[in-house]
Image (tube, grey):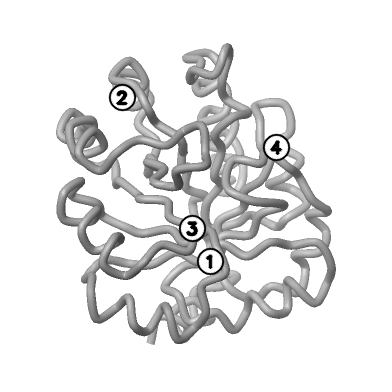
Amino acid sequence: MALLLFYYNYGAFIMTKVKICGITREIEIGIMNELMPDYVGFVFETRNRHFISPQYAGSLRSKLKRGIKSVGVFSNSSLETIAMAVEIAGLDMVQLHGDETAEYVAALREYIRCPIIKVIKISQPIDADRAMYSTADFIMLDGGGAGAGKTFDWSLLGSVRRNYFLSGGLTPDNIVSALQVSSSPFGVNASSGLESNKVKDYRKVMKFIQAVRDFNQGKKR
C-alpha cells in the first residue's frame, strides 16, 4: 500500500520537506523550535559522532515543539534494540542506514508501529533502480554511510519514480542545485553540512531551510 501511494503521488506538486539530523544538544533543540524543520534526527549508531542514548534523545524530544517529527537513525541494529529506542525516546519514525533487507523491514513492522525509512547508497544507475523496489514506507538516497557527508551524482535520480528524501553532503550552498537537478525530492536531509565546530550553526540551518522554502514558493508560481 505504501509503495502504491508513493507511485500515485509521484509527479504531483509537493512541498519539499526538511529533515535536520544529528541533534545532540539542547541548544540545537532551541534552534529547531525557532526554525521549525519538518523532521529532526537522533542517531543511535554508536560509531557515529552524533550518537546519543535513547534516554537522552527522549529528554531532547520532550522539548521539541509540536509539529516537528522525531526520527531515530539505526544501522544493522537488532529488532529489540530499535523497538526499545522507539518506546524510550518516543520516536515518530525509524531510519535504517545499514544493510537491512526487505525481510528485516517486514520483521521490524511486527515490533514497531511507526513509519520506516530505508537509506540506499547511490553510486551508479542500478542503485537508483533498486531504490524503486524498497518495501520501506519511505526511502532516503545518500552518497555514503550515516554522517559521511558525501554528495553523489544527483542526475542518477532521473529514473526514480517514487518520492524520496535526498541526503549526503547537503549544505546551504548546494541545496538549490540539488533540488533542481534531483527534480524536487519529497524531502532533504542534512547534518554535518549545517555545523560549525561540530555543533548546529543557527545561520547555516536558517539559510538551508529558507532556501528550501524559497524553492517551494518558486514551484507554486
Q: Quadrant of the C terminus?
A: top right
Q: Quadrant of the N terminus?
A: bottom left
Give how far across and how far down residue 101 sits, in percent.
52, 79
CA–CA distance in space, label 3 to label 2: 24 Å
Expressed as whole percent of the image width and height from the top left, the position of residue 44 reads 39, 46
Nearer the observer, disc 4 or disc 1?
Answer: 1
Instruction: Determine which residue is flagged by label 1.
Output: 139
Expressed as whole percent of the image width and height from the top left, the position of residue 59 reads 17, 32
- Quickly name the residue at label 2: 29
For marks 3 and 4, give the CA distance.
29 Å
* Nearest to N terminus: mark 1 or mark 3: 3
Q: Determine crowd level at label 3: few under 14, some 14-19, many 20+ residues with C-alpha closer than 10 A.
A: many
- Residue at 48%, 58% (x, y): give it: 75
Q: Quadrant of residue 122?
A: bottom right
What residue is rendered at 29% in x and 47% in y? 69
Kindly indicate whether the residue at mark 4 contacts the one at mark 3 (C-beta within 8 angstroms).
Answer: no
Q: Tell me if mark 4 has few (under 14), some (14-19) or many (20+) residues whose alpha carbon lies within 10 angstroms of its own.
A: some
Q: Secondary structure at mark 4?
A: helix
Helix, strand, or loop for circle 3? loop
- The amino acid sitting under disc 2 is Ile
User: Which residue carries the number 4 mark?
Assistant: 176
The structure residue drawn at horizontal position 22% and vertical position 32%, both measured from the top left corner, is 64
Real-space Cα separation, disc 2 to disc 1, in angstroms: 25 Å
